[in-house]
Amino acid sequence: MPLESPLAPAAERAAELNARYAHHGAVAVLRHALTDPQVGASALVSSFGAESVVLLHMLSRIDRSVPVIFLDTEMLFPETLDYQRDVAARLELTDVRRVRPDRAQVLTRDSDGVLHRSDPDACCTLRKTEPLERALKGFDAWITGRKRFQGGARTAMEFFEADADGRIKVNPLAHWDKADVQDYMLNNRLPRHPLTRDGFASIGCAPCTSRVKPGEDERAGRWRGLDKVECGIHFENGRAVRG
């Protein structure tokens, strides 16, 4: 849970923050999120995936010391691990926290490393949701790179949301479209994830990520063939979003 503080309930604060910053741009929303006392202590959660470098770059221009939580599920592509180190070094981020699943729990619940085949939700819980819950202890808010154009339950998201644990979730890029992302990366000469050149539009764990075919939604390569579109770290009304 977040730190003890006199802050109002997260839902009330999110509504007030959205009203206050409704007409601000992404950089301004991020800057305000890091300084507005109604948001509280914040960390940025990043997958260091296909588009993650945009928000990381914005953060580096505002405050390189803000904690960045990187969930290493121990099933990521080697290219993602290399990219994470490269981006963190280039942007001179000073507090990147590489968070792994609990070793004892992995040995108990997924000792052979194939849980994702029989129960991908349970695998995401073990390797993403639970580690993130531990990593966010002491924070009142967390910053994500989610965007409306990614579809599903994301199409109506606001800059500020209340999550199931009473924290504020900040989405500075909520109103950006694909062209905005690409233009920002190009204009700022930001390094691209190497797998994007090989047809991977949305990049997660290696066993559950595949290439995207022309014309497909960019998240079609995540958990292909399954009725699953989110890893479980994003919630609505206390439940993991499934689309």
Image: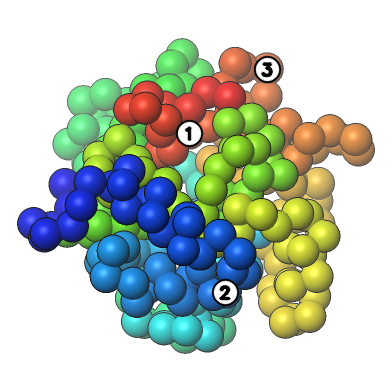
Residue type, mark 2 in image? Val
* Callout in the foreground (2, 3): 2
Residue 40's image quarter? Answer: bottom left
As drawn, 178 above or below 227: below
Q: Mark 2 or mark 3, which has the lower sequence index?
A: 2
Q: Where is residue 162 in the image (x, y as percent from the top left)?
A: 35, 43
Dots 2 and 1: beta carbons under 8 Å? no
Which residue has dot 2 on it?
27
Residue type, mark 3 in image? Gly
* Callout in the foreground (3, 1): 1
Which residue has dot 1 on it?
231
Which residue has dot 3 on it?
225
Number of residues whose C-alpha sits closer than 10 Å to that of mark 2, classed few (under 14), some (14–19) or many (20 or more): some
State which quarter of the image contains the C terminus: top right
Q: Which of 193 and 220 is in front in this view?
A: 220
Q: Where is residue 219 in the image (x, y as percent from the top left)?
A: 69, 37
For residue 174, say whether it is visible: yes
Question: In what element is the residue under mark 2?
Answer: helix
Q: Mark 3 or mark 1, which has the lower sequence index?
A: 3
Q: Which residue is drawn at 34% across and 76% down?
A: 35
Q: Where is residue 204 in the image (x, y as percent from the top left)?
A: 56, 43
Number of residues whose C-alpha sits closer than 10 Å to that of mark 1, classed few (under 14), some (14–19) or many (20 or more): many
Q: Which residue is drawn at 61% across and 64% down?
A: 23
Question: In what element is the residue under mark 3?
Answer: loop
Q: Residue at x 30, y 35 (%)?
A: 164
